Image: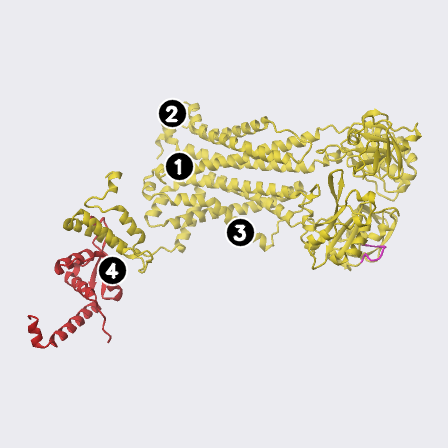
Chain colours: A red, B yellow
Amino acid sequence: MKRTFLGEFEEVVLLTVAILGEEAYGVTVTQELEQKTGRSVGFSTVHTTLQRMEEKGLLSSKMGGATAERGGRRKRFFTVTAFGRKALQEVKQVREELWNALPPQTLQLMGG
Amino acid sequence: MSKADRRKPTATTPPRWVATLLRWFAAPDTLEETEGDLLEMYAYWVGTVGLRKARWKYIGSVVRLLRPFAKHKRSKEYPQPFLFSYAMIRNYFKIAFRNLLKNKGYSAINIGGLAVGMAVAMLIGLWVHDELTFNQHHENYARIAQVMQNHHFGGEIRTGSGTPKQLETALRNQYGSNFKYLVLAGGAGEHTLAFGNTKVTQTGNYMGPEVAEMLSLKMLKGTRWGLKDQNSVMLSESTSKSVFGDSDPIDKILKIDNNQSVRVTGVYADLPHHSSFSNLAFIAPWKLLEKDLPPWIGWGNNWFQLFVQIADNADMNRVSANIHNAKLNHIDKEEAKYKPVVFLQPMRNWNLYSNFKNGVNAGGRIEIVWLFGVIGLFVLLLACINFMNLNTARSEKRAKEIGVRKAVGSAKAQLALQFLGESLLVVSIAFVISLLLTRLCLPEFNNVVEKKIVVPWNMPSFWLACIGFVLFTGLVAGSYPALYLSSFKPIAALKGVTSKLTGGHFSGSPRRVLVVLQFSVSVTLIIGTIIVFRQVQFAKNRPIGYSRQQLVSSPIKSDEIIKHYAAFRNDLLNTGIVEEVTATDSPVTNTFVTNSGFSWKGKDPSMTDEFVTLRITHEFGKTIGWQLKHGRDFSKEFPTDSMGFILNEAAVKYMGLKNPIGEMIQWGNNGKYKVIGVVKDLVTQSPYEPVRQTIFFLNYIRISLISMKIKPTASASAAVAKIGSVFKKYDPENLFQYTFADQEYNRKFSDEERIAMLTTFFAVLAVFISCLGLFGLASFVAEQRTKEIGIRKVLGASVVNLWQLLSREFLVLVIVSCIISGPVAWYFMSDWLQRYTYRTEISWWIFAAAGVGALTITLLTVSFQAIKAALLNPVKSLRSE
């Protein structure tokens, strides 16, 4: 089967959505990413990525949770689909296979 | 938060314009969560990086999220209501009928007004259609034309349809390739047809043999070439019936005017009423007429008509231009002075564009078609305005229904559709009523306009037009209420705050504008009617210079009368009932004979003169009672009077004579005539035109008409019987016919009187419809202000106070209408009057009268409701609800 290609940023966002569980929507994903990675993440980038991954079928979404601070507007909560989980597994597996293939002396050189 | 503050960004609110930008250009599917997310992010950024940076980040994010060309990808979360669901449509019908039945008075005014308006529009539509399709049933409609001529008379170009008979041969020989058929015609008028003892008088014509092909006559018997033989005749179906009954007319021998024996060679179907030849009851061969014509008839005698059908590949304008000089090439210098130009008047112009001014086509009936077309549209518009006004006014009562419908999810489009549908329903009902009304009024209408219009029940295009008409009226009349009602705000509508329903201060203004429009049209029509009436009256009151009372005329149909004129006259006088007898060559109420070629002392040699001439006998003056100004009347004591002229004042002026009596006038080769008298102008032609220069002279041979003055004591019927017996004695073969001069004269006003009658009808109708609407509006306003009136009464307002309160608004509207319609009416009516040389003035009191009239009617209409409301017991009105 052909593997789904996940970009690096997509992978990180997908992981974050998985971490946040029930609470994953645009704002939380952006803030979580900033805090966890320490890098400044554009909201628009995250938003677009989430949309794109939903179109690809990696994520699913539903509306809900309107609050006053949002002017009564609802949020779009994202959850990782089975296909998304499989894609994450595959990425992880590829990484691990690559790490395992690394010769031990090189690993030492890198300070591992 | 006040308005001013809202625009400035604070810690919690980012700049509004950015959000607006987002709303306009962001992807529509994700708009809601994006807006929310961005608000949360903004608050977060304000906390982490500060207000300034937060704003920049916010703006940057928005800009990057703009997707100006994005479209909806996901389906809506809620199902879109189906606009034409069966249940809802049934519901609409139910509600519509309930509403109609609940307000019976309003419904009656609404439907009745609209039905009357539509019926009028339909009648006018049928009439306009009839006028526009005049002659079109002739297969060769586009290729048929009548040959006409322009002549120059002293700086003025006169156009006439008479042609010399030689023109036909000239066109045939020299321009033959341009024409398919050429038909000469002459001797049109009433003729007696006799078969055995059956005698009928019918209008027929003597025409060339190609006429049947040209007019594509539908032959019931015989062929279209039945006129080739000189002694033949073709009859119309109805003529054949009246002469021969049901027996076969073919090859029977008829006698025309008791001297021409002809064989019936064909019967054609009657020509329809909207044809220029509709009264053609029989056609005799042109040759039959020609053989009896005097030999001296030449190029100068424009006595005949020439109809042509141009060749199949020819162009009407080009042919017309080709034949311009067809006459000029054949005539001598003296005749050529008049510069005759021959041209074609195509059949499509015969009916609607028949007037010529200085040689150029100057419209004609088309103006009246336009006038009534526009008036018809206006009446329909008035009815539509009523409908709109009453509907919007009444709609406020339905505010709750609209509120509920909106609350349970009706879209604006659905509501608009509902109300449009409702108006279409009402229009359909009104349409059915108007069809009935049209059917009922058509005979009377036909009488007034002298037509035979029928409702074309089985013509698909008629029904198509009707459906289009219903749709148009329904949409126009329903559009404003539909848009107005569907824009109600649901909360206000449910609370019942009527003034805030649409949010504007001016929600009542369109209604006011419509009322003003209605009354402007009505008042304009009233003013127009008064002016038309005054013009007719003015022309009728014009002094005509002779007495037309008790004056009977009868055509001379037998030469016996001319031969024994003196004895004939004596016999008439001996009846004891006739005061005086004279004979003329054309009727005194319509002198159509003109002559030229006169020369007198001091005449400009280059002047091309033209005079109306009237051949008379010695007693003419006494018979009609003319007034001599100078000189003397013709007298039998002076035998030289046979070479004498009597002129009218216009002729003296035209010739520029200082002392006309005794002047000698040379008339071509006819000899020198001496002027023996001058009479005051006699109106013998159009009562709206100046009197034309006229010459009276004696002639006992070329006379065609006997005129008799009946004694004032005698009754007309007894006189006619006695005169008839004298005619019978000298002319036993022909039927005695007669006309009264005063009736003939009055016929000159028939066109104007018809216009007056129709405009009166329209004006009354317009006022009626407008008042109907006003009545409905006033009652609505009174009903709406029931409580207010109750409170005012309790606080001591008198009935007069309340009446003023309720009437003032409408009065102001009508006054505004009067101010608008005055100049409009003045402009159009002064334009209309321009066509009459002899015309009435437009004086200020006409406008004042129309205005006062409109105000009075308005007051009466409104007062009824106002007083009714004002007299209501306040206890009752305050307790309602």
Q: In which quarter of the image is the C terminus of chain A?
A: bottom left
Which tag, 2 or 3, sits closer to the chain's start?
Answer: 3
Q: Distance between the residues labelled 1 and 4?
A: 47 Å
Is residue B718 positioned above or below A15 on the image?
A: above
Task: Name the magenta segment's main secondary structure.
Answer: loop
Mark 3 and mark 1 residues within 8 Å of each other at the beta carbon: no
What amino acid is at disc 3? Answer: Ile
Q: In which image quadrant can residue B190 be found?
A: top right
Chain under callout 3: B
Q: Residue at x 20, y 44 (%)?
A: B10
| Tag 2 and tag 3 share a subunit | yes
Which tag, 1 or 2, sits closer to the chain's start?
Answer: 1
Q: How far apart are marks 2 and 3 (CA)?
A: 51 Å
Residue B350 location (% of width, % of height): 69, 47
Q: Which residue is labeled 1 in the image?
A: B506
Mark 3, residues whose alpha carbon is within 10 Å: few (<14), some, or many (≥20)?
A: some
Callout in the foreground (4, 3): 4
Mark 2 and mark 4 residues within 8 Å of each other at the beta carbon: no
Chain under callout 2: B
Span of residues in magenta = B226-233
Residue B677 location (% of width, % of height): 84, 27
In-front residue for pair B65/B849:
B65
